[in-house]
């Protein structure tokens, strides 16, 4: 539901109030409303936030549309709070006297939050992380970012997409929104962190900082990320569905065409080539699987794609037969061995790497968080609690069985083969598997045979 605000409040253009299920009624800048009311932005209504996760969690049907509006709202709220704290907090007033946040900065940050997901393809990360690499390799899918912010205000970059420590409003919105729609919970207090955020001067520019008392609250944010990846984003069944959708898109690619204009001529391009033409790309949404289901092409590949999509709706999914923990990953020049390729082709299986982390590879992510007190950087003690984790990244390899039936010896043979491997090479990496320690069985020596232990007295 949207209600126009008065022109006196917003100038010549009317703004609108959006009733958001997470943040309640939120007022959007009239310029943001103009962006929302475009076909390019409205397209986000038809791209699910969590890809194929709704086949595991029925409530996960929310889209990039509402997430982008929520991110814009939080971005505006955070930047306004930073502005207020600059002028009212005595400890930070002097160090920030050479920089200021004006209304133009606030609008730019709100627009950045609103538009940050416009580039997503069908089923969100499935398209750019699974489908495009299969069709084009990783080299053809790169982001181009232009620096348009004053160097003195470099901290504004941390608000929407923070590459320094991953603390940004994009994550704050989707953690809360995803948990709400998945039926899960998290302990991170977002509004508290926004209220306590400050801008502090560092050797290289300015950073957004938090008081040391926020240590455990921010750690809960990183833990929420890990939990959501474990329980939802990389759930074995969710990944099975996404692998099936990816396989179907690869098979149907030549038949899935999208129109665009080149001068006065109307042309078409296949799905994997839409990334080179934004007019065609703007037509790509989750509706692509309905095209596979209901269009009829006679070629073999399209029929196979159609059967895979039909299997999803019959709940005849790929099966995760084995999940093995990896202790070490090494870079290698050679690809996987011919023997492994032959076995994978013979049994029709798929090996999928799965990584769970707190967002900073193997390091404690709290090491990159900026903490301050009275305008000065402080370093909280590492021993905030003896119960915090010591390991921050885990890697697994999963074996997926792609056939419908588990009957016969094929599944058991494939499972036994993968279970007994000591290492596996895939896509230029060698994965060394974890070997569980065997418990030592204590045996009585020859001298002790026939002897009896004395009963214990209580």
Image (tube, helix red, strand yellow):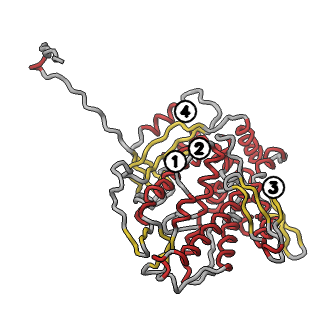
Count residues near mark 1 (Cα–Cα under 10 Å), then give few for <14, some for 14-19, many for 20+. Answer: some
Give the label, 4 or 1, closer to the camera.
1
Which quadrant does the C terminus fall into? top left
The answer to whether residue 331 of the structure is visible from this angle is no
Mark 3 vs 4, N-terminal side: 3
Secondary element type, mark 3: loop
Give the label, 3 or 2, closer to the camera.
3
Q: Above or below — where is 262 with respect to 320?
A: below
> Marks 2/4: CA distance?
34 Å
Residue 305: x and y in percent read 73, 45
The answer to whether residue 308 of the structure is visible from this angle is yes
Q: Above or below — where is 455 with respect to 240?
A: above
- The residue labelled by disc 2 is 184
- The residue labelled by disc 1 is 227
264 sits left or right of 375 in the view: right
| Dots 1, 3 in contact, CB < 8 A | no
> Marks 2/1: CA distance?
10 Å
Residue 386: x and y in percent read 33, 50
């Amino acid at each position: 539901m949207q209600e126009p605000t008065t022109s006196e409040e917003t100038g010549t253009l009317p703004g609108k109030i959006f009733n958001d299920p997470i943040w309640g009624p939120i007022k959007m800048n009239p310029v943001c409303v103009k962006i929302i009311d475009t076909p390019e932005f409205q397209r986000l209504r038809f791209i699910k936030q969590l890809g194929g996760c709704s086949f595991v969690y029925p409530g996960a049907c929310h889209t990039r549309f509402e997430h982008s509006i929520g991110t814009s709202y939080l971005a505006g709220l955070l930047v306004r709070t930073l502005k207020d704290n600059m002028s009212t907090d005595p400890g930070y007033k002097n160090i920030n006297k050479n920089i200021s946040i004006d209304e133009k900065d606030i609008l730019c940050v709100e627009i950045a939050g609103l538009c940050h997901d416009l580039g997503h393809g069908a089923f969100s990360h499935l398209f750019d992380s699974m489908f495009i690499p299969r069709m084009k390799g990783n080299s053809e899918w790169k982001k181009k970012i232009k620096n348009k912010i004053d160097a003195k205000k470099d901290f504004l970059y941390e608000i929407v997409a923070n590459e320094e420590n991953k603390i940004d409003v994009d994550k704050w919105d989707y953690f809360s929104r995803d948990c709400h729609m998945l039926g899960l919970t998290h302990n991170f207090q977002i509004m508290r962190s926004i209220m306590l955020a400050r801008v502090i001067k560092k050797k290289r520019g300015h950073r957004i900082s938090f008081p040391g008392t926020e240590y455990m609250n921010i750690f809960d944010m990183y833990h929420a990320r890990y939990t959501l990846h474990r329980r939802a984003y990389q759930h074995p069944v969710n990944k099975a569905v996404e692998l099936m959708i990816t396989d179907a898109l690869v098979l149907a690619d030549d038949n899935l065409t999208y129109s665009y204009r080149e001068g006065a001529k109307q042309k078409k391009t296949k799905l994997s080539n839409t990334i080179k033409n934004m007019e065609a790309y703007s037509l790509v949404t989750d509706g692509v699987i309905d095209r596979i289901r209901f269009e009829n092409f006679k070629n073999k590949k399209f029929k196979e794609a159609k059967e895979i999509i039909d299997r999803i709706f019959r709940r005849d999914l790929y099966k995760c037969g084995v999940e093995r923990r990896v202790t070490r990953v090494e870079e290698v020049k050679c690809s996987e061995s011919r023997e492994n390729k032959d076995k994978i082709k013979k049994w029709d299986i798929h090996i999928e790497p799965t990584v769970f982390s707190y967002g900073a590879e193997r390091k404690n992510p709290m090491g990159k968080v900026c903490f301050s007190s009275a305008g000065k950087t402080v370093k909280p003690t590492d021993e905030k609690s003896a119960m915090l984790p010591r390991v921050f990244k885990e890697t697994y390899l999963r074996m997926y069985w792609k056939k419908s039936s588990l009957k016969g010896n094929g599944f058991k043979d494939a499972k036994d083969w993968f279970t007994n491997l000591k290492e596996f090479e895939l896509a230029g990496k060698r994965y060394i598997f974890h070997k569980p320690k065997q418990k030592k069985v204590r045996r009585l020596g020859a001298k002790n045979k026939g002897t009896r232990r004395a009963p214990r007295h209580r």
